[in-house]
Amino acid sequence: MVLLWPTAVPTDLVLGDVDEQAVFGAELVERAERFERFLYVLWVLSQVALLATLWIYARKGAGFTRESAAGPIGTGMLLGMLGLAIVWLVNLPFRLVGHWWALRYDVTDEGYITWLLDDWILLGAQFVSLCLALVIVMGLARRLGDNWWLPGAAVFVVIASFFTFVSPYLDYTTEPLRDEPLLEAADRYESELGLSDVPAYVQEVAEDTDQANAYAYGFGPTRRIVFWDTVLQDPFDQEEQQAVLAHELAHHSQRHLTEGIGWFAIFAVPGAFVLMLATKGRGGMGTPEAVPIALIVVALFQLATAPAANWVTRRMEAEADWKALEVTRGPDAVEGAMIGLSETSLGDPDPPAWTQLLLGTHPALADRVAMARAWESRQGR
């Protein structure tokens, strides 16, 4: 953990107050607050529905083992997929309402049929991931008994590392960035950040949404950054696009992708231990009867650790913001990019504290503006 702790953000940095209505505009702030307030309520209701569904399934689901002739691991996989399908159906109304709300506020243009098809694809991926996890956990538990949890956590860290490494090779939704000014800026920033060439790509989403996004993924020879094409058009000007570019390159220079794997390991070990303890009463994870209770344990663990996990990602995002300020030396561009993100995604610049605790993977937009101003102040401007 000591190796993951250092950050480029000065320890004595103090963020001043930001008048979000003055910076982002009173009308945008009011609209964003109204948009996200509804989504917060929807999220709370969906979590209640999720946990209630999994609690019922944990109590009743083991009864389905009597209907299966697929063997212990095969039956466990069937129970896992059944539980996931039930959860998907229970949460579908909440997701539909959320999509309706996004359409109503013009955050997305994606029709219901296309959205549902995308949701099915995501569900299919979740089925595959769940089956893989159950094969590993149940296989280890049947061989090692209650001692499966430590090697099990190690295996999951290896799998997470593998998918982080190969995911750029599996992505066929992007094409190389051809914006010459951005590519020239990338060369400068890579040199300042001590990076070798990091390929930049573009993903076309503008037909379905106005939301703007960019991300870094892969590590070592597979690292790259991806812009949604919405970042490369209004309301973002060239300097603001370069600020986004520098932020994503900083994720690679600070090794945040591999750091993320390290943090995943820190959470995976106690998570596997808790799962082992919680399922002992059902015969342990080597028995299919334990699978329904394992699902609710995982859901509760993820909810309980969300504040810590979100704190980790916010810390990384803040560090990437700071490094972007150092190489672009453009606090006004960073501030403009934050305003653009709020406009295109209707992000509340200063969300309630509880939502940042449970849902906030990035610092609040107002805090990111405050950091840009704090950096400028430290330069004596």
Image: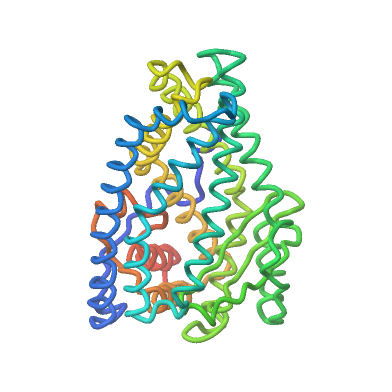
Image position, residue 142 (x, y; %): 58, 17
User: Which of the two residues, 188 or 361, is positioned nearer the viewer here?
Assistant: 361
| Apparent side of residue 174 relative to residue 73 in the rendered image (left or right) | right
Image position, residue 50 (x, y; %): 32, 46
Q: Farthest bottom residue?
A: 234
Colour pattern: rainbow
Q: Quadrant of residue 18?
A: bottom left
Compared with 362, 184 (above or below) is below
| Apparent side of residue 247 relative to residue 271 in the rendered image (left or right) | right
User: Which of the two residues, 342 or 281, is positioned nearer the viewer here?
Assistant: 281
Image position, residue 77 (x, y; %): 55, 35
Instruction: Point out the image quarter for the C terminus.
Output: bottom left
Tell me what residue is drawn at x 41 percent, y 21 percent. 279
Tell me what residue is drawn at x 42 percent, y 73 percent. 341
User: Which of the two residues, 101 or 82, is positioned nearer the viewer here?
Assistant: 82
Q: Quadrant of residue 308?
A: top left
User: Which of the two residues, 12 or 103, is positioned nearer the viewer here?
Assistant: 103
Looking at the rendered structure, the number of numbered marks drawn on it comes to 0
Tell me what residue is drawn at x 30 percent, y 68 percent. 348
| Apparent side of residue 42 relative to residue 240 in the rendered image (left or right) | left
- Residue 1 seen from this side: no
Image position, residue 353 (x, y; %): 24, 54
- Residue 317 seen from this side: yes
